[in-house]
Amino acid sequence: MASAGAGTTPLPPKVASLGLRERLDALRNFHTGAALLRDHGGPVVRVPIGPRGLTPQFVIVTSPAGAHDVLAGFDGALDKGVRVHEETKHLGLNIFNLPHEAWKPRRRALQPLFTKRHVREFAVHMSTEAQVAAERAIDAGRVELDPFTRRLTLQVLGRSVLGQDLGARAEAMAGDFATLLEYFTDRGTSPVRVPARLPTPGNRRFARARERFFAVIDDAVDQCRRDPDHPAELIRLLLDARDPETGQALTDEDIRGELSAFLIAGHDTTATTLCYSLWALGRDPSLQDRVAAEATALGQRRLDAGDVSSLELTTRVIHESLRLCPPAAAVGRLAVRDVTVDGWRVPAGTNVIVGIMALHTDPVLWSDPERFDPDRFLPEFSHTRDRWQYLPFGAGPRSCIGDHFAMLEATLGLATIVRAVRIESLEARFPLAVPFTMTASGPIPAMVTARS
Ligand code: HEM
């Protein structure tokens, strides 16, 4: 990334031949909208939605070079702070939305819990809960894959980092998650926002959902405070964290804000990855049998982190699911000063959005991009790929802290489930929506039978 001298570098082209309504729709539905905006202006495109000063300014970036310029490194020019990040502050300040300087000590304090080495300790929850889920699915015979995988990932996240059994609350929490996240995205992509303090029906619905959500978190923190042996590693780390300069502990509000980020960032995302993978295998019985055979070759014992190197096809299925269905379909940064992105000058104050889904499905970058083909991720095909065209976990300093956790959970979960059951997807399509992260927008039904 390079800081741009005003006037020396041209501004990106404005999106052409789309009306205001279409531009707003494309911004709100950014999973498909980013590619549409690229088609109407190029890989770095300005999307005006009203007068500068009165409405936010957006630039959408969909080239690998542009993604690099926005995300790699940090020189203070592009930071967190786009409208959607600001909206998430209604749940508190946290590792996801804090600007760089305030974020650094938090990331440093929490990173040890999420190293590749440390997350191996959570494998036991990942495999055990997946086996329980598979058995429940056999009993049911037919499952809706979206709630099925959400329940599983909430359970794994709860047990691993919060020391809580959240599985039983999954259904009750799902509605509140949806309310909170849609509120952030709707407000983050609208030209105007109703002040959050006004008692509108939307604001009141949000406040009620937040109250219930915080009650779950406060309960987990209370339990951890009362019991020094409580297995809530993340909460314990937050309780013990000290500001490196002032030596001060985090406030209860800080801890609540932080735990909100982990529940939101870690739950839906991995659930959707597993959901999409199961659906894709449910559409391709022979691929599914190969994945099942890979896991069966390891025996019927509980799978562990050490097995991942033998689950090579399973891992490629997950990579391909993350390509076609990246739960973070776009990520954003605020231009704090003028910057150059892929040769264009982006003025200070602009919301810069990197279209990850658009990069993952660009026909210029991928052959037959809509086809589900895990072999794309064979080493012989991977080494020619630009590192910046495949970014499911983001990149640079603010990339996903939970990437090892998520990959381990998805790999062990998928292998465990497919070893136990045969899945038949009943729908040919996987409809998508972006309440915040990208999720299934409708039911994903499947028939499930025991594999004997
Ligand atoms: C398949 C699953 C997942 C995907 C695709 C995913 C994707 C991402 C992406 C793209 C970012 C960067 C956002 C940005 O640049 O603005 C991110 C950040 C983050 N993710 Fe994940 N994530 C996943 C799972 C998880 C899990 C399991 C956790 C925690 C247990 C987690 C916690 C976080 C946090 C805390 C951040 C903010 C990091 C920071 O700014 O330092 N994620 N994630």
Image: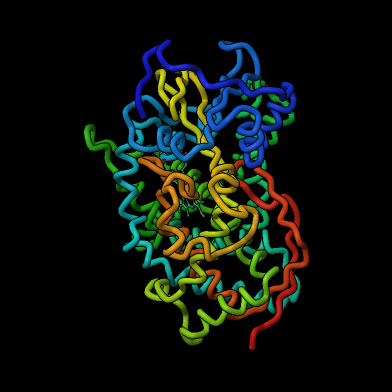
Q: Could you tell me how many numbered marks the image carries?
A: 0
Q: Residue at x 69, y 27 (%)?
A: 24
- Give the percent coordinates (x, y) of residue 82: 51, 28
* Residue 171 shown left or right of residue 394 in the figure: right
**Foreground residue, 361 or 180?**
361
Instruction: Please identify the quarter of the rendering in which residue 180 is found.
Output: top right
Viewer-proximal residue among 166 and 108: 108
Residue 229 % position (x, y): 35, 63
Quarter of the picture containing the C terminus is: bottom right
Q: Would you place residue 294 above or below residue 375 in this image?
A: below
Residue in the picture at 40% in, 33% down: 69
| Above or below for 425 versus 295 | above
Q: Is residue 445 left or right of 368 when viewed as pictured?
A: right
Q: At 34% across and 47% down in the image, what residue appears?
A: 239
In the displayed orientation, state which residue is furthest to the bottom: 452
Image quarter (top left, top right, bottom left or bottom right) of the N terminus? top left
Residue 106 visible in the displayed image: yes
Q: Residue at x 33, y 36 (%)?
A: 73
Tell me: residue 230, above or below residue 252.
below
Q: From this view, report whether residue 50 is shown above or below residue 172.
A: above
Measured as percent of width and height from the top left, residue 209 is found at 64, 41
Colour pattern: rainbow
Q: Where is residue 348 in the image (x, y as percent from the top left)?
A: 45, 17
Q: Is residue 214 visible?
A: no
